[in-house]
């Protein structure tokens, strides 16, 4: 066959699945797929295992490519698959720019499969002493982290191991420092959350920066006060016009309006491409005055409103006025004004 799709191969007990395999005059070209916005070089290690299995089976790989989303593509009325996908021969940098060659990087990382499989067969978890390093928590925490280091999962809330962003907490733990209140301050970076955590432990569990919190409260308005929450779905392939790959579609909101001691509840729940009716109901239900409160508004509701304003420019002005009235209820906690 010229093309193989989702083809499975096996060498000894190691099985792989190749997304796309293309037989050309020069040999076999291998295509991997990535559904992340920025496929980085960290994918190379798993790709190299596939190449090595194929090599052991007598199948030499000629070129290696990566099929990924074109994050600049905006869907029209019809889905254009040629615009939706990019076939690339390079990984991306952390900023999304073309980086290292996929073919060269993957082929440089091939492993001795026979030795690897032998080590797996002889592996006994009891013989392994976990050693913590930067890879354990880099970007995303390793899936085995809690198994290797159960002291983290069992740690009390005031454990030095939970000190926010501290590069030296393991060092302090090894020295016998167990609680945040006993932290060696020469080994603490001193960010606001760390300060709040240490002070909370010294104050039997609760820290409040009263002057800063008083200032934050001075910005609060109560008549009316609007409390807003959105729900949404993320779509890998844009299902409707004006959406990009991995776009977000808000389909529901819940709104509580507090005015002179009375609470009014309004809500909307849509189906399908309900973005326009979502906007229209939101603008109709929102009082013209009053602060709008949401927890993590900067990272959620305000982003959704900005996206809707870009997709429906005829509503841009009133939508962005909503964002100007937003108050993020998470800020006192993220700023270290309160720590419980």
Image (spheres, helix red, strand yellow):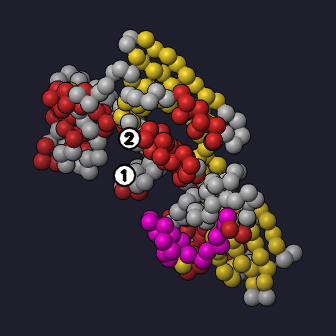
Q: Is residue 216 above or below residue 123?
A: above
Can see residue 206?
yes
Viewer-closest of 9 and 90 = 90
Residue topped by disc 2: 324
Q: Residue at x 40, y 16 (%)?
A: 259
Image quarter (top left, top right, bottom left or bottom right) of the N terminus: bottom right
- Residue 67 drawn at (x, y percent): 65, 68
Viewer-closest of 76 and 163 = 76
Q: Is residue 295 left or right of residue 159?
A: right
Can see residue 300?
no
Q: Is residue 208 above or below residue 49?
A: above
Q: Is residue 90 magenta?
A: yes
Q: Is residue 95 above or below residue 259?
A: below
Label disc, if present, on residue 132 of the rendered structure: 1
Choose the circle earlier in sequence order: 2 or 1.
Answer: 1
Q: Is residue 98 magenta?
A: yes
Q: Residue furthest left?
A: 186
Dot in front, 2 or 1: 2
Q: Residue furthest top?
A: 261
Looking at the rendered structure, the secondary structure element under dot 1 is loop
Q: Evaluate if marks 2 and 1 touch, with contact meaning CB atoms under 8 Å apart.
A: no
Instruction: State how far apart marks 2 and 1 are (Cα).
Output: 45 Å
- Residue 87 drawn at (x, y percent): 65, 73
- Residue 221 drawn at (x, y percent): 31, 25
Which residues fall within the magenta stretch?
Answer: 84-100
Q: Is residue 324 left or right of residue 55?
A: left
Q: Is residue 181 left or right of residue 307?
A: left
């Amino acid at each position: 066959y010229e093309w193989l799709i989702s083809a499975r191969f096996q060498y000894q007990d190691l099985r792989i699945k190749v997304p796309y395999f293309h037989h050309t005059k020069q040999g076999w070209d291998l295509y991997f797929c990535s559904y992340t916005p920025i496929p980085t070089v960290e994918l190379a290690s798993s790709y190299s295992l596939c190449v090595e299995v194929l090599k052991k089976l007598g199948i030499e790989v000629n070129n290696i490519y990566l099929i990924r989303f074109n994050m600049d593509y905006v869907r029209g009325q019809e889905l254009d698959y040629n615009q939706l996908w990019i076939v690339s021969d390079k990984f991306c940098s952390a900023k999304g720019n073309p980086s290292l060659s996929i073919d060269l990087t993957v082929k440089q990382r091939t492993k001795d499969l026979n030795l690897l499989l032998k080590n797996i067969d002889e592996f006994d978890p009891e013989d392994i002493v976990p050693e913590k390093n930067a890879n354990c928590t880099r970007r995303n925490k390793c899936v085995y982290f809690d198994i290797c280091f159960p002291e983290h999962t069992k740690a009390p809330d005031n454990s030095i191991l939970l000190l926010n962003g501290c590069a030296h907490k393991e060092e302090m733990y090894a020295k016998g420092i167990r609680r945040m209140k006993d932290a060696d301050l020469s080994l603490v970076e001193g960010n606001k959350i760390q300060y709040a955590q240490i002070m909370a432990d010294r104050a039997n569990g609760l820290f409040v920066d009263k002057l800063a919190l008083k200032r934050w409260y001075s910005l609060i308005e109560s008549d009316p006060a609007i409390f807003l929450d959105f729900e949404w779905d993320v779509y890998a392939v844009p299902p409707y016009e004006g959406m990009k790959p991995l776009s977000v579609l808000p389909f529901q909101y819940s709104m509580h309006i507090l005015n002179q001691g009375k609470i009014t509840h309004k809500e909307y729940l849509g189906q399908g491409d309900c973005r326009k009716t979502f906007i229209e109901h939101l603008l109709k239900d929102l009082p013209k005055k009053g602060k709008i409160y949401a927890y993590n508004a900067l990272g959620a509701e305000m982003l959704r409103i900005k996206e809707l304003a870009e997709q429906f420019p005829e509503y841009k002005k009133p939508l962005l006025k909503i964002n100007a009235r937003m108050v993020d209820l998470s800020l006192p906690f993220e700023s270290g004004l309160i720590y419980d």
